Image: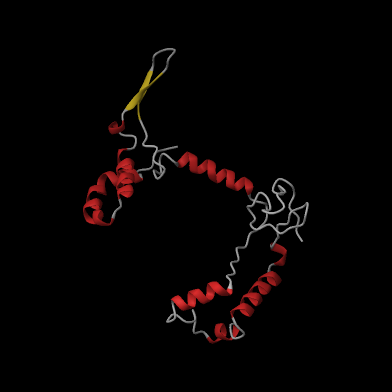
């Protein structure tokens, strides 16, 4: 793999001091530490070591030490790739739709904290759809999605007890404690 022409560390080394001068008052100490660590990553400032063969003594060059900061894109690329690969293995081979429904108490708290906001839309069609109340609107919306895409939607149920899984990525149902992820999840 070839090295990209510019890396985050290069940008921080070139413009980091000007950035800290301009925005230093709004940066927290941990943010400043991250900027410094990334700028020093894999440079002589952190030291290094010779890449040499113990058998023949051939010296390939100097490798500089990394900062190992969890925010450093160069140091954490391998860890991020491993994490993503594990998450990909947990996914079931189905299409996912993410629907979020809030409770009436959440909506009341939201509307009381932002009373001037009102409806999100002044579109007559949207207002007509919500005319029976937000609960009826959410039910109609969910029903429409189920009707239009029923062949693409799979619900995850525990194959042993039939309980509905809270999330497609869950390894087990919280209350039944059955590990359903490794078994074939059934659609109901």
- Left-right relation of 83 to 50: right
**Residue at left offset 42%, top offset 12%:** 56
Q: Residue at x 62, y 75 (%)?
A: 138
Give the residue at the far top of this rendering. Answer: 56
Q: Quadrant of residue 10?
A: top left
Quarter of the image with the N terminus is top left
In this orientation, which residue lies closer to the viewer: 132 or 104?
Answer: 104
Rendered location of residue 93, percent (x, y): 67, 52
User: Which is more toward the observer, 156 or 64?
Assistant: 156
Residue at horizontal 62 percent and vertical 85 percent from the top: 132
Q: Position of residue 133 (x, y in %)?
A: 60, 82
Q: How many marks?
A: 0
In this picture, is 92 found above or below 155?
A: above
Q: Can you give x and y, in whole percent of width and height, for residue 135 in the image?
A: 62, 78
Evaluate whether residue 133 shows in this view: yes
Q: Is residue 165 above or below residue 40?
A: below
Residue pictured at 63% horizontal, 59% vertical: 96
């Amino acid at each position: 793999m070839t090295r990209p022409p510019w890396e985050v560390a290069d940008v921080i080394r070139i413009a980091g001091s000007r950035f800290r001068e301009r925005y230093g008052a709004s940066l927290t100490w941990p943010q400043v530490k991250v900027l410094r660590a990334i700028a020093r990553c894999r440079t002589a400032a952190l030291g290094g070591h010779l890449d040499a063969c113990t058998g023949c003594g051939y010296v390939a060059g100097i490798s500089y030490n990394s900062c190992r900061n969890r925010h450093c894109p160069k140091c954490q690329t391998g860890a991020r790739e491993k994490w993503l690969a594990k998450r990909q293995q947990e996914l079931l081979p189905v299409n996912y739709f993410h629907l979020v429904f809030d409770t009436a108490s959440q909506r009341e708290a939201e509307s009381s904290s932002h009373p001037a906001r009102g409806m999100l839309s002044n579109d007559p069609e949207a207002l007509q759809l919500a005319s029976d109340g937000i609960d009826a609107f959410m039910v109609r919306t969910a029903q429409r999605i189920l009707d239009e895409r029923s062949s693409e939607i799979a619900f995850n149920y525990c194959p042993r007890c039939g309980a509905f899984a809270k999330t497609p990525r869950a390894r087990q149902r919280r209350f039944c404690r059955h590990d359903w992820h490794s078994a074939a999840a059934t659609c109901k």
